Amino acid sequence: MDRSDRSTFDSLRPRLLGLAYRMLGSMADAEDAVQDTFLKWQAADTAGIANPEGYLTTVCTNCCLDALKAAHRKRVDYVGPWIPEPLQIDAGSDPEADLERAQSLTTAFLLLMERLSPKERAAYLLREVFGKPYGEVAAAIGVSEKACRQLVSRAGKHVQSPSSRFVPAPDHQQRMLDAFMRAVESGSTEQLSGLLSESVQFQSDGGGKATALGRILEGRGDVAKYVARIMSRLWDGGPVRICNINGVRGLVLLQDERIESALTLGYDGDGRIDRIFIIRNPDKLARLEVPLQHDLKSGALWQ
C-alpha cells in the first residue's frame, strides 16, 4: 500500500467509525469492523476505485452487517437488558448545527436501531443520517433502489418515537439532571414523579458482571418508587462527575477513582425525563475515561 492509499483511508476512518458505532452500538465492535475494512482496502486494486469513500463505506457497511449476525447470537445469552456502550462525546460549541447526526448518537436512538433488521438499520443510517443517495445506499447493501427505498421507509416508521429524537437544550438538560439528583438524594418519590413522563422507562445494564435490574421498568409510579428506594442507596456518598454521554448530559459514579456506573437520560417532546439508562457492566465503562470528538457535519468520531 502506498502512502496516498494510506492517507485516503486515514482521512475517512473517523467517518467509518461513526457509521460502524451507530450500526453496532459497541465501540470495540466498530473498531473491529473498521480494521477489517482497512485490511480489505490494503488488498484491493485501489487504482481502479474511482470513489474511495463510496467503496470504503460499502465495505464497512458489510463488515457491520456480518458483525450484527454475530452480535445477535451474543445477545441471546446476554444477562439482563442490553444498553449500547456509552461514550463521552464532545460535539463542540454548537450541538444544534446538525440535529439529525447529533440525535443519532443518543442511547435512546441507538436502542431503537435494535428493533430494525440489519439491512433496515444500514439503509436508514446511510440515507437519513449520513445523507447518501439512494443508489449508493442500495449498492452498499446489495439491493435494488426500489427495495432500498422500502427499507428506509419501513425503518423510519419504527424510529419516529419522540423520545428517540428529542434532545433538549443543554441548559434544560442540566436543570433536569440537577433536579433528578436532588430527588434521588432526598429519596422523595413525589419529587421524582414531577420530573418523569407518564411513559417513562428505567433500564439498567450489568451484563451479569454488576448488580442491575433484570427487566425494563415502565410507568411513572413504578419507576419513581424504584429510583427513590434503590438508586438513592446506590448513589449515596460516592463522588459523581458530570459529563456528556452520547450527546446528552449525564453523570458517572466513581469508586476509588474508577467509574462504577454511568447514567444518561432521554426526554419526551415536553422535556420531561422519558428514559433512564444506567450502565454498570464494567466492560462498557472504560471508554468513558477518554472523551471523543464528534463532527456534526460528517458524523465522524475520533479521539
Image (spheres, grey):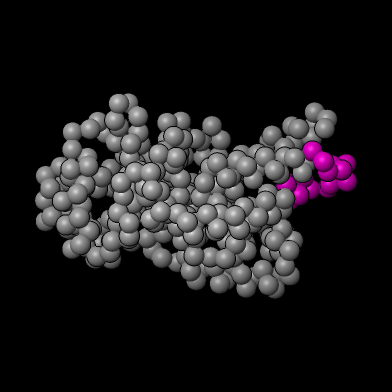
- Image quarter where the N terminus lies is top right
Q: Nearer the viewer, residue 102 or 264?
A: 264
Based on the picture, tell me whether residue 108 belongs to the magenta stretch: no
Residue 38 horizontal/vertical position (percent): 72, 40
Q: Is residue 3 visible?
A: yes
Q: Nearer the viewer, residue 131 or 109?
A: 109
Q: Nearer the viewer, residue 274 or 31?
A: 31
Residue 51 horizontal/vertical position (percent): 79, 48
Q: Is residue 277 visible?
A: no
- Image quarter where the C terminus lies is top right
The residue sitting at 88% across, 46% down in the picture is 48
| Magenta span dominant secondary structure | helix
Along the horizontal axis of the image, is 6 left or right of 266?
Answer: right
Please state the extent of the stretch shown in magenta in the rendering.
Answer: 42-56
The residue sitting at 13% across, 55% down in the picture is 189
Total numbered labels placed on residues in the image: 0
Residue 233 horizontal/vertical position (percent): 18, 43
Along the horizontal axis of the image, is 38 left or right of 161?
Answer: right
The residue sitting at 28% across, 61% down in the picture is 217
The residue sitting at 79% across, 38% down in the picture is 42
Residue 156 horizontal/vertical position (percent): 52, 68
Along the horizontal axis of the image, is 225 left or right of 25?
Answer: left
- Against 53, residue 226 (above or below) is below
Based on the picture, tell me whether residue 48 belongs to the magenta stretch: yes
Residue located farthest toward the top when viewing the structure as drawn: 257
